[in-house]
């Protein structure tokens, strides 16, 4: 297993709009981030990944970019960003930027110039097609619900948008577009940025002619024509060889509908490697089909199968990106844990994924156990995807059930402001009102309270990340699952250079008789992490407590 700095780091994700407001206008910004760099460092992470900071109309909160080389004015200036970049580097923190090049904003100058002059080079930067009579060019659906084509009256053509109407897809088959992407990469890398998280990067190559799909799916009809498209490998390798390989940087691609087999084509280590890591979504489907809006009952066996498959299939060949929360997912305690046992289940979930082989990513607020917001009306939501999906769902199941589903599935659950203390607006802003909701539980769940409690979720994350950093077995060890058929226990071992580690996680509040797997004697192991103080042993096992977790280390 080749060692590398990106394998040994842990990453903290900042969704800037809701992180911390430094200028008192109610919106999170770079001054707020600068004020919290010491806090981020104190977690034991080694890098910050910023969701988009670029100039944007904010129709999809930064994922609709109007200018790749400037900072959104609400977040500050380029000078503010450089202060954050320098401040992070001074603290030994690397900075990862979001690279969103499947699409731009419809307010980007490329798109606007292409409309104004259909003969200009910018027109071919996007996918423009004439309709078939009164019909759209094909039957593709947007992943944000609704058709993937929008008519433009000025030039009597449709443009493709796989996401919001305001997010037209770039035509990556145009070599001039790829040169623009490379110039954007160079701009940020030359400034000192340490890498990129590449948004829906596996969508950038579309099948020639953009044919209609014979299959129907409510939010992804046509996906087989643009997921892992015909030139994807070629374009990713071009970006790597022409730009990325010339810098000491890392890349992690985001890839819906990704499998280990497909991922290995992109992240297998060697001269033809396209990306360092891949964010997949398979493990986030243990309570749903495809993604959280198609809700099902949580099944631990489904979660374990995915975790184990990615651990085993990639080990020794490629590197995993580990996460349970981000800006696109509801809060994980509400999904895989228990709000009733919030502290216990948050700690257990942290161990579940951070003790696997891979680079762990932690989303803002996850480290204090933030929960979903109790929305009461669709009018409280701001996320374009949520609103579009709700409008589709209510036609099928009615308003009440559609709202209940939104409460569970919405990305807005992860976007309520970070809860810093018990002051007004949870200490997020000094403004009268923040840009978005403050969870009413902020008096109990906040950073200040967690700092004072040695047994808090926050301090558990610190201890867990410190343990990972100090023990290479957590980073580079192999993986073996035990008790695969259990509906309550997720147990696995790691082995590295003569050391063994046993990780025990309990998904549920009912007591279970646990006995150590064959070859393990708990009395001879060192209990290095646990979420209960009285972690006793009886007959090489124990009766589990609600959402219990234990990690034993054996020499």
Image (cartoon, grey):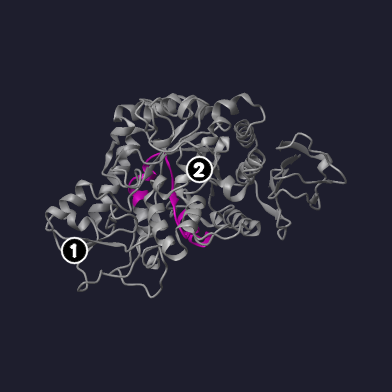
* Number of other residues with Cα within 10 Å of mark 2, as a class: few under 14, some 14 to 19, many 20 or more: many
Disc 2 and disc 1: Cα gap in Å? 41 Å
The residue sitting at 52% across, 62% down in the picture is 289
Q: Is residue 268 visible?
A: no
Q: Earlier in the sequence, mark 2 or mark 1?
A: 1
* Horizontal and vertical percent position of residue 381: 41, 46
* Number of other residues with Cα within 10 Å of mark 1, as a class: few under 14, some 14 to 19, many 20 or more: some
Q: Which residue is denoted by mark 1 in the rendering?
A: 157
Provide the secondary structure element on which disc 1 rests: strand
Q: Is residue 514 visible?
A: yes
Q: Which residues are magenta?
A: 239-267
The residue sitting at 58% across, 55% down in the picture is 310
* Horizontal and vertical percent position of residue 33: 42, 29
Q: Residue furthest right?
A: 539
Q: Which residue is denoted by mark 2 in the rendering?
A: 373
The label number, if any, that marks residue 362 in the structure image: none
The residue sitting at 58% across, 52% down in the picture is 316
The quadrant of the rendering that contains the C terminus is: top right
Comparing 425 with 412, the one in front is 425
Please give left or right for residue 413 compared with residue 487 in the image: left
Indicate whether residue 255 is drawn in magenta: yes
């Amino acid at each position: 297993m080749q060692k590398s700095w990106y394998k040994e780091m842990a990453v903290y994700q900042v969704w800037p709009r809701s992180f911390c407001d430094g200028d008192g206008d109610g919106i999170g910004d770079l001054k707020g981030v600068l004020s919290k760099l010491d806090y981020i460092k104190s977690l034991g992470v080694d890098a910050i990944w910023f969701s988009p900071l670029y100039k944007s109309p904010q129709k999809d909160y930064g994922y609709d970019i109007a200018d790749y080389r400037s900072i959104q004015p609400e977040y500050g200036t380029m000078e503010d960003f450089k202060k954050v970049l320098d401040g992070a580097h001074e603290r030994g923190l690397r900075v990862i930027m979001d690279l969103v090049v499947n699409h731009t904003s419809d307010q980007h100058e490329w798109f606007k110039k292409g409309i104004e002059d259909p003969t200009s080079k910018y027109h071919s930067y996007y996918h423009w097609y004439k309709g078939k009579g009164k019909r759209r060019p094909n039957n593709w659906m947007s992943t944000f619900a609704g058709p993937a084509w929008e008519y433009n009256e000025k030039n009597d053509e449709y443009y493709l948008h796989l996401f919001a109407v305001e997010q037209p897809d770039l035509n990556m088959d145009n070599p001039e577009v790829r040169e623009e992407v490379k110039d954007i990469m160079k701009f940020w890398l030359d400034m000192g940025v340490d890498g990129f998280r590449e948004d829906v990067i596996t969508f950038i190559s579309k099948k020639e002619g953009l044919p209609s799909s014979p299959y129907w799916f409510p939010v992804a009809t046509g996906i087989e024509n643009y997921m892992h498209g015909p030139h994807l490998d070629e374009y990713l390798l071009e970006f790597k060889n022409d730009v990325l390989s010339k810098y000491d940087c890392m890349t992690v691609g985001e890839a819906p509908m990704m499998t280990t087999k497909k991922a290995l084509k992109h992240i297998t280590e060697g001269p033809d490697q396209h990306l360092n890591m891949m964010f997949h979504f398979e493990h986030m489907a243990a309570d749903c089909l495809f993604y959280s809006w198609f809700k099902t009952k949580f099944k631990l066996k489904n979660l374990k199968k995915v975790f184990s498959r990615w651990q085993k299939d990639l080990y020794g060949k490629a590197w995993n990106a580990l996460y349970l929360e981000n800006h696109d997912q509801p809060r994980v305690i509400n999904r895989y844990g228990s709000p009733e046992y919030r502290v216990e289940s948050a700690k257990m979930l942290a161990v579940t994924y951070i003790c696997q082989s891979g680079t762990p990513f932690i989303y803002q607020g996850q480290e204090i156990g933030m929960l979903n917001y109790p929305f009461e009306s669709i009018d409280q939501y701001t996320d374009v995807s949520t609103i579009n999906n709700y409008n589709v769902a209510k036609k099928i199941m009615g308003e009440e059930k559609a709202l209940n589903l939104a409460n569970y599935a919405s990305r807005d659950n992860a976007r309520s402001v970070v809860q810093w203390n018990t002051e007004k607006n949870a200490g997020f802003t000094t403004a009268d009102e923040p840009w978005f909701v403050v969870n009413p539980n902020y008096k109990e769940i906040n950073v200040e309270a967690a700092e004072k409690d040695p047994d808090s979720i926050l301090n558990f994350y610190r201890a867990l990340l410190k343990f990972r950093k100090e023990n290479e077995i957590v980073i580079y060890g192999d993986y073996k699952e035990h008790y695969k058929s259990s509906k309550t226990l997720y147990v696995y071992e790691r082995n590295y250079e003569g050391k063994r580690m046993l990780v025990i996680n309990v998904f549920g509040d009912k007591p279970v008789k646990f006995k150590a797997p064959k070859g393990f004697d708990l009395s001879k192991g060192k209990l290095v992490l646990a979420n209960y103080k009285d972690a006793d042993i009886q007959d090489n096992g124990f009766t589990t407590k609600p959402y219990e977790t234990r990690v034993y280390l054996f020499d």
